[in-house]
Image: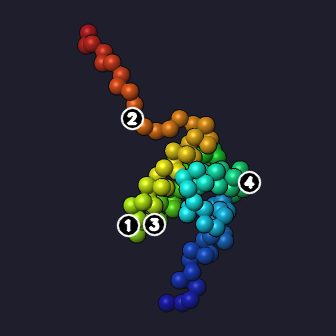
Amino acid sequence: MPRTSRRWVQRVQETSNAMDLPPGIFTRSPRGIATGLKQAVTRSRRTKGRSKLQSAMSMLNLHINRSGRTLKRADRARLEAAKGELRRTFSRKTRGRRAASPRRKAA
């Protein structure tokens, strides 16, 4: 296998249209991850998605998904908590259980 084909991640990172993230951003606290992602997405012109929140959430989900089974339970919980912090940072409603709506009577 040629040496260049093994380094596809590096080539993708250099040429892709993904935003640039500071090193070690995903090792911070949930609030630190959220604020770091917000700063990165507001500074970058290379975003994906229709909104800044969508771009930041996409990068967080990409990190979680790429980590796969090797991600420790505590780290996964911290990154999942960062999703809620990210929504709060962008002043969006957080996901949670919806209140049960009253059922309509059948006519």
Horizontal and vertical percent for residue 67? 45, 66
Q: Which residue is mark 4?
A: 43
* Residue farthest top in this picture: 107
Q: Which residue is mark 2?
A: 97
User: Quadrant of residue 71 in the image?
Assistant: bottom left
Closer-to-camera residue (50/70): 70
Closer-to-camera residue (101/30): 30
Measure the C-alpha gap from mark 2 to mark 1: 27 Å
Residue 50 numbered mark, or none: none
Measure the C-alpha gap from mark 2 to mark 4: 33 Å
Question: The C terminus lies in which quarter of the figure?
Answer: top left
Measure the C-alpha gap from mark 3 to mark 4: 26 Å
Closer-to-camera residue (104/88): 88
- Residue located at (48% from left, 55% from top): 78
- Residue located at (72% from left, 56% from top): 44
Within 10 angstroms of label 2, few (less than 14), some, or many (20 or more) residues? few
- SS of the residue under disc 3: helix
- Residue located at (55% from left, 56% from top): 29
Q: Which residue is mark 1?
A: 69
Is there a contact, CB below 8 Å, between mark 2 and mark 1? no
- Residue located at (60% from left, 45% from top): 53
Q: Which residue is mark 3?
A: 67
Answer with mark 2 or mark 3, whichever residue precedes in sequence.
3
